[in-house]
Structure formats: structure tokens, C-alpha cells
Image (spheres, grey):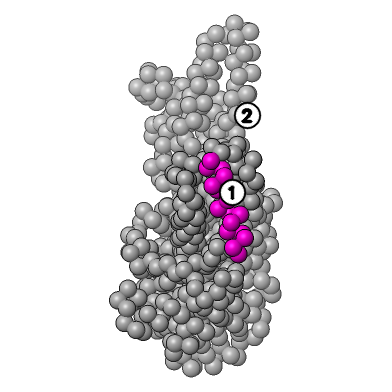
Amino acid sequence: MIEILREKANKLPLLPGVYIMKDSFGNVIYVGKAKKLKNRVTSYFRGEHLPKVEAMVRKVADFEVIVVNSEFEALVLENSLIKRHMPHYNILLRDDKTYPFIRIDAKSEYPRISIVNRISDDGAKYFGPFGSRGTSFGIISALKKALLLPDCSRKFPRDIGKERPCLNYQMGLCSGFCRGEPDAAEFRARIAQAEMVLSGNSEQLLDSLRVEMESAAEELRFEAAAELRDRMRAIESLSNKQKVIATAFADTDVIGFFRGAKTAFAVLHFNGGNMAGKDFELMDEPLEADAEVLGQLLIQYYTIKGNLPKNILLPFEIEDMEDVKNLLREKSGKAVNISVPQRGEKAELVKSALVNAREEVMRATTQSQRSNKTLEWLQKTLALPSFPNRIESFDISNIGSFGIVAAMVVFVNAKPLKREYRKFRIKETDKQDDYASMYEALYRRFKRCIEGDEKFADVPDLLLIDGGETHAAVAERALADLGLILPVFGMVKDDRHRTRALVNSSGEEIGIIGNQAVFSFVGTVQEEVHRFAIEYHRLLRSENIASELDRIPGVGEKRKAQLLKEFKTVKAISQADLQTLAQVVPSNTAKAVYEYFHQKEKNT
């Protein structure tokens, strides 16, 4: 079957379009877009893939394609087909039914407020979506109480004057429109005020009511002024409590995305610089790469919203950025700025969104699930022959002219195993030669393994070396000289000393920034091995300093501490003249220190 599908895919044109994967029952199981249909579709039927892609490909019995005129048309068509078919293997946000809209029948003499699942082209006004149906009902109830609108089942003008006003009128919760007064014009005015609140214009409404209240007071219509005052207080309370309204009309949305044992899509809403709310979705692992997934999620999320923010901040570039901007511009009728901030306050907001996405995954999964998924991706990304359960990492630390040390840390199932950490004091060279030092550390570690040393018995599934391609090549040569072959990669840092990629001995870089879980894990490994190397470095240096001063007659712990506090290093002490030393310690001690180092110079 794969051969037949591959042959069919090879006949596709190098044109933009959408492809539709179907199973043996004719069900649509996946929809995707492509800049060049032939290249994209054939990629599914050759080589190896991530487990979920493999599972999807095994179920493909046939596929169809739709050729379009541009990549933008492909983007729009893909989104439309995904909504229509809801394919099992596509990344999907919750169905529109969980995002209810508030509908106001603008054509009616007495407009009613209701909840619907979808927007229709019927002349009514729609607001939202506003989250769950319970939340939406709460908003409508609060609006009616604030504006003293009827909450009963009576229909106007049909039921005006037929029955006595209900208890709500008696309790001051409704203006009693069933009496025929206030009239239809006042009813519509109140509905217009509700629309202002639902549109995020509460402040504008409050300003208008304040002017009306002050005018009523000046005209000595104190009862009307008191009613307007009470209405303002209710609207202010509504604006404070119903944060979901502010969320729907945020001016800036900040996106977080994290792919772990599950995938999280988080949106932080900001209005006027203040946090207004948060949405998030948890999904199973998507087929697509992160840049493509995030683009699809943005389109799905914003094409069902009634209002779009002015700015959308992303953690990384998405596929077809300009096309997505154009699609959202068409949807909202205004420009939507989409950007990836690199520094400053906006970048900090994105970090916060990433943390929120990560935390949602952490809450929804166990440590074991997260670790296994991270290592699975690492295995797939690096094409490792086996699951990288045991990972060893090496780093070199120079101590000036004193010496060189190497450190080895061990991670098992993505967690540090500190009892397996090992330290090496480099013996074969006293020069600052990282490559020779790395060779010696690796050679000694695995020679002891071959010789049966129990402390070095376990063989790693992966070696991560702090450094670039030359460090990786040196490590491979040390293994080869012992007749061993193991996967070796260097950990490459960016200009901010953060791990940005892995590199093999041939200089081929494997980017890991796009996968937050792998990026975080490799960064943790690099920080840990560097910390351990520096810690050993400092220990030996302090031991060396202490042993050098301990050789001088008359210099005890107190005098040693005084000298090191003032001069910082043994080298500075050795270069100080007698008068300078005598200003720090007693003259007899100063003379002993001076003579010790100067006698030492004569002997050398």
C-alpha cells in the first residue's frame, strides 16, 4: 500500500494546495496544506517518522488533493476543511459549541438577549465568545440586574399590561417594562448600554451615565439621579467581577506553547497593560512541527472569536506568518500585529505565557510521562540507535597555571544520578588544551570500564560534550582508540551562554530551541556538568592555596586568613614586598612569608 501511495504522490504537481488523508472506510483522518504538494505528500511515504506520524501513515488508504492559486488560499482552505471534518490526527481546539456567543435581536422593538453556539447572518448582534455557557448565563444575569431589564418569560409588546408586575419589580430588580412604562425607547436604550458593556466600552458608558446623573441632579430630579447612580455602581461592579468581558476585548494577547507528554496552548489576555484573563488548551502530541502547529492553533482560536486583539505576541516564528496576519485582518476588519519579541517587557510577557503552558502540562502529566516523552524526542531527533536512558556529559575546567580538571555527570531517565558523578584531574598535559584534556578524560573513563572497574561499569546510551564539533570529534577518537562506538554530540552555546543546538563531529547542527522540553533538558545537563566542573576546580584551588601557605613556619589559620583576605591569591602574596606584608600581619610573620617565597625563587 505504501508503494502505491508513494507512486501516486510522485505524480502530484509542485503547486500549492491542500491534501486530505483518508482511511480504508473513506473517513478523513488528516488535512494539511503544502507550498508544493508533491514534496510534502511524498514525505509521508518515505523514511521514518515520529510515532504519531507513523500511526497516521499506517492508516492511510488513499488521499485527495485540492490545488489552489496561492499559499494563502491553501491556508484558508485547510482551516475550513479541518473545521468541517474534525480529523482525528489534526491538532484541534475544543469544538465551537464550548464557546457560546451572546446574541441580541437588534431588529426587535424589545430586543432580547440570548445564548447561541454559532454566529448566523440574521441581522442580530453577536458578542463573544465568552467561555462556558455557565459563564455566559452569569454575564447576562448580571447585565439584567445592573440595567434593571426583565428576567422573566414575558414577551413584549404582546404581554404589556396583561398581568401584574412580578416580584422582581417589587424588589427593585426590574424597571417593570411589563407595565408599559418605561417605554420601548427606554428599553432599547438599556439594551444599547448592555451592548456597550459587552463590547468592552464600560468606561464610555459610565461617563455617559455620569453626565446624565449630574444633569438630573441639577434639574432637581433626585429620584432619577439616584436610579442612575445605582445603575453606575452596578455596572462598575459588573465590570470588576466579569473579567471574561475584559478578556474578550483584550488589546494584547500573549501566546505560550509547550510540547511535553501533552501539548499546551496558553493565551494570556492583557487590557490596558493589566492581565485580564487566561485561556489554555491541552492536547495530545501533534503530527506537525511546532512552527506549523502554532500557526494552526492561532487560526482556529481567533477565527471563532468575535473580537481580535490589536497585538499578538508569539514565543517563536510560525509558518506563513504574513498569510496568517492577512487571514486575521480579513476576519477582524483591522490590522492585527503578530510579533516575536526578543527582549524587553514584551519578551518577559512571552516567558510568562511559556511558563503557564508548561505548568498546565506538568499538572496534567506524571514525571515519568514527561521524562519518557522528552527522551523519545531526543532519540528521534538525534537518530539514536537506542533509547537514551543513561546520558553522560563531560566538561573541562582550567585553573590558570595550576592545572586542569574534567567532570562527568550522569542522567538516568532524565534525572541526575549524583552517586555516579566522577571527577578527573588531568595528568598528561599542564597546558590549557581543552581538546587534549577531553581526550584524556574520555579515554581514562572508558579504559577503566573495559578493565572491569565497577565504578565505571555502566555504558551510556548518549554522550553530551560541552563544546562544539571538535570536542565531539575528540571524544569519538578517544572511544575509537579503545575500540568503542557510542553516540556523541557537542552542546553548542549562543552568545548568552545558553545551549542553542547539538552538533556532531561532522559539524552538522541539530536545533533544539523549537522543542521546549528537549531544549530545557539539554540546558539543564550543560549547566549541571559546568557547575560540577567549576566546583571541583574551586576545591582543588582552595586545597592548593591552603597547602602552600601551610608550609611556611609561623603562619597559622588566623594569619593565613588575614593574608588571603587582603591579597586574594597566593601569587599576589608571593609578589608583595616585606613592607606591604608587614602592614597586614605581624613583622615576624611577614618576614617568614617574604623569605619563603624569595628563597623559593632562588631555588628555581
Residue extending farthest top: 220
Above-or-below relation of 512 to 556? below
Q: Looking at the image, is 460 positioned above or below residue 358? A: below
Alpha-carbon neighbours of circle 2 within 10 Å: few (<14), some, or many (≥20)?
A: few
Of callouts 2 and 1, the N-terminal one: 2
Mark 1: which amino acid? Answer: Tyr
Within 10 angstroms of label 1, few (less than 14), some, or many (20 or more) residues? many
Q: Is residue 496 left or right of residue 466?
A: right
Q: Can you say whether 188 is above or below 118 in the image? A: above
Q: Is residue 265 visible?
A: no
For label 1, the SS is helix
Can you give x and y, in whole percent of width and height, for residue 520 in the image? 48, 61
* Image x and y of residue 502, in percent: 55, 72
The quadrant in which residue 342 appears is bottom right
Label 2 – label 1 distance at C-alpha: 82 Å
Quadrant of the rendering where the N terminus is positioned: bottom left
Residue 241 in sight here: yes
User: What residue is shown at x 66% (from left), y 83% (from top)?
Assistant: 14
Q: What element does badge 2 sit on?
A: helix
Residue 197: in magenta span: no
Q: Position of residue 62 (x, y in %)?
A: 47, 85
Bounds of the magenta segment: 588-604
| Residue depth check, mark 2 versus mark 1: number of the one nearer the observer | 1
Q: How many marks?
A: 2
Which residue is located at x 63 percent, y 47 percent?
576
The amino acid sitting under disc 2 is: Gln
Residue found at x 62% / y 24%: 207
Mark identifier at residue 311: none
On the image, the x and y values in percent for residue 405 come to 49, 66
Q: Which residue is mark 1?
A: 594
Q: Residue at x 67, y 52 (%)?
A: 337
The residue identified by callout 2 is: 204
